[in-house]
Image: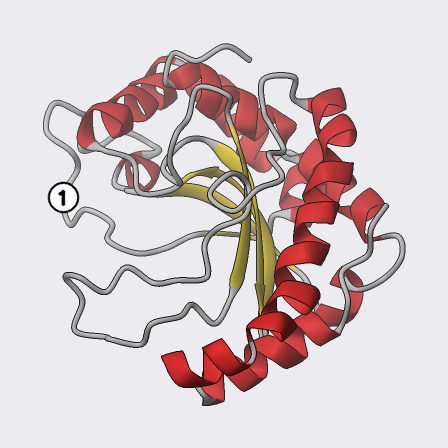
């Protein structure tokens, strides 16, 4: 397996301090050799291990495939910095076309390194399907989020933009009402730069993802996709 080099984090640190087009153009070769090329190789090598635990999920070794673009969309943002200061890898469902599809995720940012499983930023119809699945299969939901292996790896859920009130049509006294208020169904496992750059990282990553398989199966089937 391809290893992720420490120079990836060194480049992203420098980019954070010099987030402008002139600097990036002058350092484009560094981006290619330290970030893009190693991650594309890592993604390519990860395809077979990923298929062994989630046959409908894909490792697509191209920018815009499993590797997120480095360029920020600043058209409607007050923040006009042109580049992301993190590298993101998303192994999404074969039916998914965007970052909002269910997927396995890897976030590489100096000082903020983690992996995750789930669905981020889903639209209202998709959220409704997930919420309904929780209500209909509440015992299954309870079992998987309380599972010792799962909780030992994925120690937190992504927070942000939760509804202030229960969603319309759902019981406000449901025992999982706090989950029903979520707009992101993403479980996170924190990592370190040292762990990511270690020779055995790919094996560790697939093991983390394996511990999140039941969660991913629930999310995938909840939104009507094949597992």
Viewer-proximal residue among 122 and 83: 83
Q: Which residue is drawn at 27% across and 29% down?
A: 127
Colour scheme shown: secondary structure
Percent x, y of residue 31: 60, 69
Viewer-proximal residue among 188 and 194: 194
Q: Is residue 126 above or below residue 44?
A: above
Farthest residue toward the left?
168
Residue 33 falls left or right of residue 76: right
Farthest residue toward the bottom?
17
Quarter that holds the C terminus: top right
Q: In this view, does 63 lie above or below 140?
A: below
Tag 1, which secondary structure? Answer: loop
Would you identify the image quadrant in which residue 60 lies? top right
Q: In this view, does 58 lie above or below 55?
A: below
Percent x, y of residue 223: 36, 18
Percent x, y of residue 225: 44, 13
Percent x, y of residue 69: 45, 54
Viewer-proximal residue among 132 and 177: 132
Circle 1 residue: 165
């Amino acid at each position: 397996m391809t290893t992720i080099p420490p120079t990836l984090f060194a480049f992203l640190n420098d980019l954070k301090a010099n987030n402008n087009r002139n600097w990036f153009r002058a350092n484009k070769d560094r981006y290619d050799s330290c970030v893009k090329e190693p991650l594309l190789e890592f993604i390519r090598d990860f395809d077979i291990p990923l298929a062994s635990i989630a046959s409908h999920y894909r490792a697509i070794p191209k920018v815009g495939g499993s590797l997120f673009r480095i360029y920020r969309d600043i058209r409607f943002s007050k923040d006009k910095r042109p580049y992301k200061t993190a590298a993101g890898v998303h192994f999404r469902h074969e039916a998914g076309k965007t970052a909002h599809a269910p997927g396995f995720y890897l976030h590489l940012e100096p000082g903020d390194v983690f992996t995750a499983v789930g669905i981020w930023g889903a639209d209202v119809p998709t959220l409704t399907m997930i919420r309904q699945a929780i209500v209909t299969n509440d015992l299954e939901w309870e079992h998987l989020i309380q599972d010792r292996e799962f909780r030992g790896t994925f120690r937190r859920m992504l927070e942000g933009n939760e509804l202030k009130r229960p969603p319309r049509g759902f019981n406000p006294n449901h025992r999982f009402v706090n989950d029903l208020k979520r707009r992101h169904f993403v479980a996170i496992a924190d990592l370190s730069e040292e762990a990511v750059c270690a020779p055995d990282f790919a094996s560790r990553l697939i093991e983390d993802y394996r511990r999140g398989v039941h969660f991913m199966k629930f999310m995938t089937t909840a939104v009507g996709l094949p597992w």
